[in-house]
Image: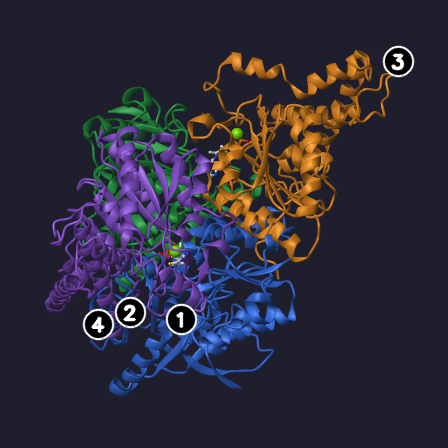
Chain colours: A orange, B green, C blue, D purple
């Protein structure tokens, strides 16, 4: 990913531009989601990824469509990155039948068989065994896909995560466990609920490959993860990646955030992955302020269209309540 | 008497019991610094300090079991499950350890522990966050299971649960924490295992507990006004042990029963109560017992669908009309 | 037809299905090299190799969930729990994940998986090794629950369970593995959800399943000889979904019912069946349904005590006499 | 533990002699238990410690009576070491009311409140959270006892063990987690179900203190564990000790043991903790062959008395079946 090329006319085909636009799209998407939630257009829990966009954009660049992905309840943007159209995600938030889970899953349960996005799960850590099962399938079928399993930092205190890290390491199952370490599990600083300074140390219990990456910078993420994925395709072994990041918003919409200082937030806001890359684009003459603004307008229009689709979509027929309990 | 919310009533119960007995402590996710995910433990950290009000990692099996071990060695833990959906991860410790310890040790190790948290569906949280665990827990001898419906009951029962020498599973609801009601000050305990007639009536008994009680109250207003049927509302409050006598008494008076519960109805507490009534009051019944429970499907996210599958006023009204053979 | 033990019948079912469908695999503790803690998987490693017959670590939550993930991506796992006592550690994956996946994904991800292992008490294993899980599992929509009582049923139902597209919990028993019976060769499937009248009779219907069936058979011999009562024995075989029609038909014939189950009776499958019978056949009943289940205490180690609390012949006989008002 | 002193008249007060006799007692006890089981004097599961005596004898020497101990289903000898009279353990096996759990627990569930033996537990790994709870109590009450938590090697693959190791490390709870690594979980070589060569590596996930000890030699165990316990009393931190040992008998009585070679067993039999120490006593002139034999006779008599007590004890009254379900 070279960003050294300098031109006087901004090169909109430059890869960094695409990365920027994608991150900006997720930023605007999640912002719009928050507005819709605040306006009571939907309900339930709502967890957004604002501040953590660099990770899912970067990781996705290292994957191919047949790779599997799974995540927790904070996964709107990951679902989109994996291929689910944004309007289907928005429609799912509104509980519409056009949503990627037909309105039965909601914010926490985005699914797509087509795009191999195995969900959106609500039980902290519960996705890790599922990911390991998908990796088992890959080995069983002698394929060379991999499984990306996103988890929060607090999920690293879940016993079932540990159990399957052991199995993946013992049986060489290609799961890339990615800890999105945004440093808090709800209102709890992760340092208060574990004894280690770095969560990648969990891998030491299993002699599992591991490392940490600065997940506030999309280029760093791509460089780092690309190597890991290439290695995993060859050696088929699992990997634990600690991705250090920060969530700018509350845990969910109702969170008063008394557990962290304004100074801390301000410090991390300086690393805003979208803004920083925007500045870089300008510095490297890949964009101008005007261009950035026009992209923003484009993207906002796109997000509005996503929402409009959701707005205009029908609710599932009531009969759907009794469907999909069993498959014949 | 003060007017308190359900969450304040529970918080007060914990506060008073922790003040009364230094061996009582509270552990769970977000219970301390955050004052509880639903603010039930508000103020407890400030009052009792971090030794007695402890934020746990997200390790339900681990801290449920830690509670059992602490209880074996003389403490009286209150373990908060952020919701009982996650409490299922602690089932091995609750079912295989807490419930059986006194018995398999030949009476040596009682487990005076309360495990509490919201049970059942809240609102649009979809399938994984809407599980009712009362059918599971009540099947296990050695446990007690409590499910209050009002702030006063919440306080009185929680205080009794904390003083009980057995593992007590205490089922609350996110939807009830904000509800208000009169709550007696100070030393106010409701013995476990004692139900209450919440409203006397003569034609039909509705047996219900927990937050669905409030839907029943609304439905009953409608029924009495619209159809002139007099309904008795019976809340067992404790599901295990169950106040069967109170139930049988009421049945012998009204001869018709509807059971309304939030859980799925297969092999549920409702099924159990129905079985007991039929068995013990067979000749007293003018109609078979009717039941309302959540439709036998996982709880969907979409609001209309969710409303459709959960017990709602409409279903309660219909069941009452069925049991009096009105339709 | 061959005479096979229950364990051989189950082994044969797995063997045939694994031969038929390469996506079927077996995972569990000791299932491969040791040929199964109870030798149910004997010979499968030799035949199918270590890719398809896999010894797992003692990580019930982990490998239950691994099964769910494998099922989501197209395989058909058979997960063996060494016993269902340990399966409780996998309840989060079974209840919160396997059962709800198809639904909350809007129909996209079926979970064709079998979770099987012995259920209930064996002999003098004390409290932690004697748990019956049928009341828990049957309360959960999305699961199917099967509990065979004979080698032939074991084979036919296990084959059907493996071909089923839903998570099926399959409840066996250590005490039954050695029991023998005629088992049809090859392609022999019993559809899930279909019960069977094991013995026709006219005075009383006994509904029972799993290993307690064999105690019922003995008790019935005694009852018919001693008291001249004609007993019909009905085995639902699948508990979820339940063959209610077969049950109601039999009730309409005999008008008297005893339900005999091994689980504790509170909020159990027995309670459920009783409720349904009373509700649907109220006017057909000559007596309230009687029930026999394990006394509501953890299972003790001492042999006499254990015998006393488990359902035994004596209790069955007494219940039958109660239901015909003989005592 | 000096064993350098040499005398011509055997010094029966020498500490090594007591250690030897205690190990021999456990050996003979368990042998007798196996005979009783084979003669169908009791039933259920029966797991013995033959070959693993050095560990529980050695550990016990480093403890004081107020320390807590907890274990799994293989715990007859640990229960006795902690103070429960052998005849009460034998009576428990026979399901008698004089048993340490009044006949309701059996082989897997030895308990004594008096001796702070918190059981005998049947769920692999289930004792670890309980142990951590006991250690929590110690901290809560500002005491300086410790908790010894015995677990099998295979228990190290249990999620709940991991969860509480994290809590113990985070909160400084004094649990000494001891993995009795007899190298097999039932018929499965532990190397087949985990990716690490040494189980103490699990501690690395939590920055927890850890080490390994040769648990076939009682003196080594005492020296090693004594230091750990002293340290724990001061710093109150948890510790993971991997105790390498070997079980000479099958997992339980019905085990055909096809999973290991006769050569392997023979190799380990050379390290028999009882025999080796017996040889040493002779070499160091602390005992003679005659003396060893006379001790053996004494001990066998003692074990027979234990069994006789069990034999002659009454069964619990049937009414006990309905007692101890709830405490008023
Ligand atoms: C097993 C379980 N316990 C508790 C919860 C409630 N809960 C939801 S999110 C959360 C915090 C998780 O934090 P983290 O894993 O760091 O993810 P983040 O929200 O920071 O992305 C908790 C405790 C749950 N969903 N599942
Ligand atoms: C949670 C759980 N799963 C399975 C079992 C069945 N089981 C009993 S002992 C055992 C092997 C344990 O081996 P290890 O921990 O090494 O202890 P050892 O028997 O060698 O002392 C198994 C699988 C159980 N008791 N608990
Ligand atoms: Mg986090
Ligand atoms: Mg072992």
Chain ID of residue with mark 3: A
Residue identifier under label 4: D41
Residue at image mark 1:
D256
Q: Is residue A23 left or right of residue A165?
A: right
Residue at left 29%, top 46%? D221
Give the structural element (helix, strand or loop) at label 3. Answer: loop
- Circle 2 is placed at which residue position? C311
Q: Nearer the viewer, mark 1 or mark 3?
A: 1
Front residue of B15/A61: it is: A61
Q: Is residue C89 above or below residue C288?
A: above
Q: Residue C258's spot in the image, x, y percent?
A: 33, 71
Disc 4 vs disc 2: which is toward the camera?
4
Query: Which-is-in-front pick, marks 1 and 4?
Result: 1
Q: Where is residue D127 in the image (x, y as percent from the top left)?
A: 32, 48
Left or right of B33 on screen, residue A13: right
**Alpha-carbon distance for marks 2 and 3?**
88 Å
Q: Which residue does the numbered mark 3 point to in the structure image?
A: A8
Q: Is mark 4 within 8 Å of ligand 2?
A: no
Percent position of residue C50, x then y:
58, 63
Query: What residue is shown at x 74% (from left), y 28% (from top)?
Result: A22
Quarter assignment of residue C287: bottom left
Q: Are marks 2 and 3 in contact (CB under 8 Å)?
A: no
Q: In which quarter of the image is residue A267?
A: top right
CB contact under 8 Å: marks 1 and 2? no
Tell whether A225 sits left or right of D165.
right
Pick whichever of labels 1 and 4 is earlier in the sequence.
4
Q: Kindly check if marks 4 and 2 are in contact, taking CB atoms under 8 A apart as contact.
A: no
**Is disc 2 placed on a helix, strand or loop?**
loop
């Amino acid at each position: 990913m070279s960003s050294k090329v300098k031109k006087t006319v901004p090169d909109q085909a430059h890869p960094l531009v695409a990365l920027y636009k994608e991150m900006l799209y997720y930023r605007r998407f999640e912002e719009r989601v928050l507005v819709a939630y605040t306006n009571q257009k939907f309900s339930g829990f709502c967890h957004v990824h604002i501040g953590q966009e660099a990770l899912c954009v970067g990781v996705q660049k290292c994957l191919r469509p047949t790779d599997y992905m799974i995540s927790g309840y904070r996964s709107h943007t990951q679902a989109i990155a994996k291929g689910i159209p944004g309007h289907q995600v928005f429609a799912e938030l509104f509980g519409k039948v056009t949503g990627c889970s037909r309105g039965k899953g909601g914010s926490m349960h985005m699914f797509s068989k087509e795009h191999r996005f195995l969900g959106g799960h609500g039980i902290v850590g519960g996705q890790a065994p599922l990911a390991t099962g998908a990796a088992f399938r890959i080995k069983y079928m002698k394929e060379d896909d991999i499984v990306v399993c996103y988890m929060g930092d607090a999920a690293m205190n879940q016993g079932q995560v540990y159990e399957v890290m052991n199995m993946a390491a013992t049986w060489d199952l290609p799961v890339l466990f990615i800890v999105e370490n945004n440093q808090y599990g709800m209102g709890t600083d992760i340092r208060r609920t574990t004894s280690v300074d770095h969560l990648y140390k969990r891998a030491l219990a299993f002699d599992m490959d591991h490392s940490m990456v600065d997940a506030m910078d999309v280029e760093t993420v791509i460089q780092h993860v690309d190597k890991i994925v290439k290695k995993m395709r060859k050696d088929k072994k699992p990997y634990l990646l600690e991705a250090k990041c920060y969530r700018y918003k509350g845990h969910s919409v109702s969170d008063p955030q008394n557990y962290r200082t304004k100074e801390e937030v301000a410090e991390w806001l300086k690393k805003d992955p979208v803004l920083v890359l925007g500045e870089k684009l300008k510095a490297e003459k890949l964009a101008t302020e005007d261009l950035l603004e026009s992209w923003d307008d484009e993207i906002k229009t796109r997000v509005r269209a996503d929402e409009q689709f959701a707005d205009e979509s029908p609710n599932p027929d009531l009969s759907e309540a009794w469907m999909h309990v069993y498959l014949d | 008497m003060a007017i308190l919310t359900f969450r304040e009533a529970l918080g007060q119960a914990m506060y008073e019991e922790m003040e009364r007995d230094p061996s009582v402590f509270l552990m769970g996710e977000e219970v301390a610094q955050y004052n509880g995910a639903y603010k039930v433990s508000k103020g407890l950290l400030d009052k009792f300090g971090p030794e007695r009000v402890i934020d746990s990692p997200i390790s339900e099996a681990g801290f449920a079991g830690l509670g059992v071990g602490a209880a074996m060695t003389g403490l009286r833990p209150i373990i908060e499950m952020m919701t009982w959906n996650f409490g299922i991860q602690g089932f091995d410790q609750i079912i295989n350890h807490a419930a059986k310890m006194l018995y398999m040790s030949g009476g040596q190790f009682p487990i005076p522990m309360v495990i509490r948290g919201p049970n059942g569906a809240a609102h649009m949280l979809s399938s994984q966050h809407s599980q009712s665990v009362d059918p599971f827990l009540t099947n296990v001898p050695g446990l007690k299971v409590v499910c209050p419906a009002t702030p006063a009951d919440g306080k009185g029962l929680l205080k009794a649960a904390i003083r009980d020498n057995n593992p007590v599973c205490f089922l609350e609801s996110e939807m009830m924490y904000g509800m208000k009601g009169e709550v007696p000050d100070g030393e106010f305990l409701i013995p476990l295992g004692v139900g209450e007639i919440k409203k006397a009536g003569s034609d039909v008994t509705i047996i219900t507990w927990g937050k669905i009680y409030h839907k029943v109250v609304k439905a009953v207003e409608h029924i009495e006004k619209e159809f002139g049927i007099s309904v008795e509302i019976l809340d067992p409050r404790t599901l295990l042990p169950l106040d069967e006598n109170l139930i049988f008494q009421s049945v012998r008076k009204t001869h018709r029963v509807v059971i309304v519960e939030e859980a799925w109805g297969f092999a549920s507490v409702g099924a159990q109560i129905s079985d007991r009534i039929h068995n013990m009051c067979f000749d007293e019944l003018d109609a078979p017992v009717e039941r309302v429970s959540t439709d036998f499907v996982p709880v969907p996210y979409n609001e209309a669908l969710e409303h459709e599958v959960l017990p709602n006023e409409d279903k309660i009204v219909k069941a009452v009309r069925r049991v009096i053979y009105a339709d």
